[in-house]
Image: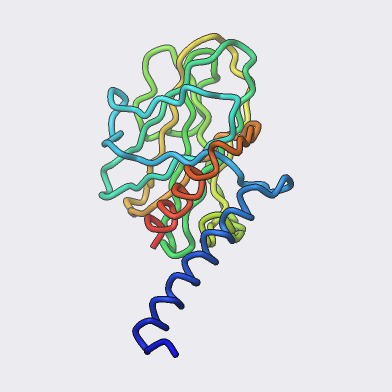
Amino acid sequence: MPNTQQARRFDNKASMTAAALGIAAVLVQPTRVNAEIMRFQETDNYSPETAIIIRDTKTEQRFFGRLENKDQTAYYSVTAPKDTELQIELDTPKADGDFDPTLTFFGPGLAKPKEDPVIVIGEGNGAIVSRVNERGAYFDRSVFTSFFIGPRVKIALPEKATYGIAIRAPDGRTGRYTIRLKGKDEFKWSELTDRIANSFKAIFRMY
């Protein structure tokens, strides 16, 4: 009979294998909503000059980030042709409580915002400032985390140009967020290992 230490090792391996298989099953379900490519904040993106560049507007992808102090604004940028349809969703982990950042989409061809965008949007640019008054919530199986539903922006780009996305908490709160760019989930079996690894990485960052 195996000794206690061997039994524990077996249980641990079984648990890890079950978890990996569970995530794999979730990732390959054809009807799964959040089967997107996950990307992570590896460098500071707290200024327009250091914005994370979104190079692909067709594939569904999600960026994980964090505002660490009350004066920070996280920036992303996207360059795309006129009439490109973008759908951007900003959500926050329920564990971060009252952290409720604002999503500002800005660039040429947009109307002047009706409210103060808080950030500098640049001469000649307009902006869409999106906030949420009543927050719903959902559980994301891919990262085993509950999220508050945050601001949304859906737009067909008025010009071929570079547009900015800014995330800031006007009340000075700090916390974690995910920003999702909706698109097609073009799953490939060759990417399965990377997707499982990214799911574990996302879970690690959520807790």
The quarter of the image holding the N terminus is bottom left
Above or below, 13 against 75 in this view is below
Residue occupying image coordinates x 49% and y 45%: 193
The quarter of the rendered structure image containing the C terminus is bottom left
Left/right placement of residue 86 relative to residue 113 reads: right
Is residue 107 or residue 90 the one in the foreground? 90
Nearest to the observer: residue 12 or residue 181: 12
Q: Residue at x 63, y 54 (%)?
A: 26
Q: Nearer the viewer, residue 110 or 45?
A: 45
Left or right of 179 in this view: 29: right
In the depicted structure, whether residue 184 falls above or below residue 123: below
Instruction: Point out residue 84 in the picture as x, y percentages from the top left corner.
Output: 62, 18
Q: Position of residue 142 (x, y in %)?
A: 56, 54
Residue 190 % position (x, y): 55, 36
Relative to 41, does residue 108 appear above or below in the rendering? above
- Colouring scheme applied when the structure was drawn: rainbow
